[in-house]
């Protein structure tokens, strides 16, 4: 399925008039014009001017900066443009330059305010917006999230709770700026989504004027809202901790080739090695066909060398021997970061070439396939960590189950955001795991871990 981070001890650099403080302000129901903005600058309060700047279309704001303006108008327009078109370190530097140039401008009083959290818990929400891909290649995932959101709201309604009006937007139709305008016109007070990474970046660039819970994470940071996601980095970290607790500290890593999602996980292994003391051996990337996988395993496991020694011994002695290949002894467990098709090839080959009792840890991707459930006999005995919802509904369509669970949690947790402090207290036991809010306003997931036994997950550890 990220927020602007104010440097913790530098209260003088408030990057951040904008996204950090503005998101806590109510939004205008309709767009603004330059004429209205100039009237507000002449007569309104600083907070009213900020709201008007946020509602002004970006193209109109850029046009206004280049016009003949008085001292007050030009300062406000340039400040608004910085907020709408920059982020992170670039925005911090731009704001410092603005303060030097516009010393004495009324807007400097806003920059002197302590920065509010970059994502602010909403009050009671009467209209809830949802932004999901409801057309295009990711439509199935978007529809699964929406089904989860609706199921959560239906459950609340049945229990007698007040349920907000739901307004649904397709993130694949129109620009994010236009979508935000539509949301404001329809009275949306809080937004769930977007789900796709490119729409998150487009939303950040547009300068959102609504509090929101994104359903993905922005890896580079700087996203102005809360984040709840299904990224596998947290799952992998927990799986490595399980290896360490079970006494396995030399791990052969077999990772899929030509899979975009694999490389960030492999890149995370050195950091996890430092944290846990686990050593990872990464010989290469696993091929796609059974024949290629078998050749690679024979080489990586040392089977070829063992067979060559047997052949040489037979040549020298002219005798034949009963022979079992000797596998390399420099690892005590295997980690598979592969998809379902490769998982069903690799695990039986490992059983045959090494030993069926060799500990094998897998990412939950091995249970996700568009061709139906993976035969469980092929994966018998593997260790893995996964969403509570998927473990309870094991064998169901794995991808749909995960995104449905994401929708369930999103529709429940946004009401409880006031319980959380970034990097501090507050725990939510949800369908995607036990959730805590990180210092960057991204929810961290703690997962149950299990062993596949008799075709069913046997829970080994509960979420922390």
Image (spheres, grey):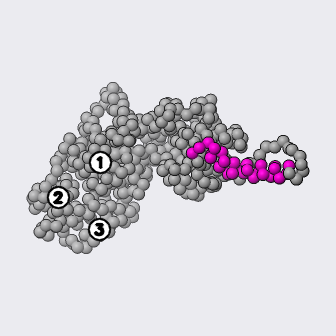
Say left or right for 125 vs 365. left
Q: Which mark is residue 211?
A: 1
Q: Which mark is residue 94?
A: 3
Q: Residue at x 28, y 67 (%)?
A: 95
Mark 1 or 2, closer to the camera: 2
Counting from the top left corner in percent of width and height, residue 48 is at 17, 55
- Any part of residue 60 in sight: yes
Q: Residue at x 16, y 48 (%)?
A: 30
Counting from the top left corner in percent of width and height, residue 111 is at 26, 64
- Any part of residue 449 in sight: no
Query: Regarding mark 3 in the picture, which secondary structure is present there?
Result: helix
Which residue in the rendered view is the most extreme toward the top?
A: 158
Closer to the chain start, of discs 2 and 3, is 2
CA gap between label 2 and label 3 equals: 20 Å
Q: Which mark is residue 337?
A: none
The image shows residue 287, relative to residue 94, as above or below, that is above
Say left or right for 250 vs 417. right
């Amino acid at each position: 399925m990220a927020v602007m981070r104010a440097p913790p001890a530098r209260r003088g650099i408030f990057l951040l008039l904008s996204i950090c403080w503005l998101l806590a302000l109510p939004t205008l129901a309709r767009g603004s014009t330059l004429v209205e903005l100039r009237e507000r600058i002449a007569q309104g309060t600083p907070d009213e001017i900020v709201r008007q700047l946020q509602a002004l279309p970006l193209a109109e704001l850029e046009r206004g900066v280049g016009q003949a303006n008085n001292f007050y108008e030009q300062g406000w327009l340039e400040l608004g443009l910085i907020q709408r078109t920059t982020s992170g370190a670039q925005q911090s530097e731009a704001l410092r330059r603005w303060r030097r140039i516009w010393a004495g401008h009324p807007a400097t009083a806003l920059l002197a305010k302590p920065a509010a959290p970059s994502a602010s818990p909403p009050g009671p929400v009467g209209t809830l917006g949802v932004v999901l891909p409801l057309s295009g290649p990711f439509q199935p995932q978007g529809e699964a999230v929406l089904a989860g959101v609706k199921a959560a709201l239906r459950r609340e309604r049945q229990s007698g709770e007040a349920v907000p009006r739901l307004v649904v937007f397709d993130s694949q139709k129109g620009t994010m700026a236009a979508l935000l305008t539509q949301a404001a016109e329809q009275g949306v007070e809080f937004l769930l989504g977007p789900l796709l990474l490119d729409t998150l970046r487009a939303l950040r660039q547009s300068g959102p004027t609504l509090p929101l819970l994104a359903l993905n994470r922005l890896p580079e940071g700087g996203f102005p809202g809360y984040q709840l996601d299904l990224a596998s980095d947290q799952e992998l970290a927990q799986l490595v901790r399980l290896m360490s607790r079970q006494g396995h500290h030399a791990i052969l890593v077999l990772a899929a080739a030509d899979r975009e999602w694999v490389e960030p996980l492999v890149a995370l292994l050195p950091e996890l090695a430092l944290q846990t003391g686990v050593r990872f051996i990464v010989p290469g990337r696993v091929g796609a066909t059974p024949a290629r996988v078998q050749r690679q395993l024979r080489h990586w496991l040392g089977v070829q060398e063992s067979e060559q020694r047997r052949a040489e011994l037979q040549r020298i002695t002219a005798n034949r021997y009963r022979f079992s290949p000797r596998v390399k002894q420099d690892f005590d467990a295997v980690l598979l970061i592969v998809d379902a098709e490769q998982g069903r090839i690799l695990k039986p080959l490992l059983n045959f070439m090494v030993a069926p009792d060799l500990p094998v840890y897998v990412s939950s991707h091995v249970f996700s396939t568009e061709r139906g459930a993976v035969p469980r006999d092929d994966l018998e005995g593997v260790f893995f960590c996964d969403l509570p919802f998927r473990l309870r509904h094991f064998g169901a369509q794995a991808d749909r189950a995960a995104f449905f669970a994401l929708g369930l949690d999103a529709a429940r947790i946004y009401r409880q955001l006031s319980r959380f402090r970034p990097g501090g207290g507050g725990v939510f036991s949800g369908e995607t795991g036990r959730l805590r809010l990180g210092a960057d306003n991204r929810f961290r997931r703690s997962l149950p871990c299990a062993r596949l036994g008799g075709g069913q997950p046997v829970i080994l550890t509960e979420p922390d």
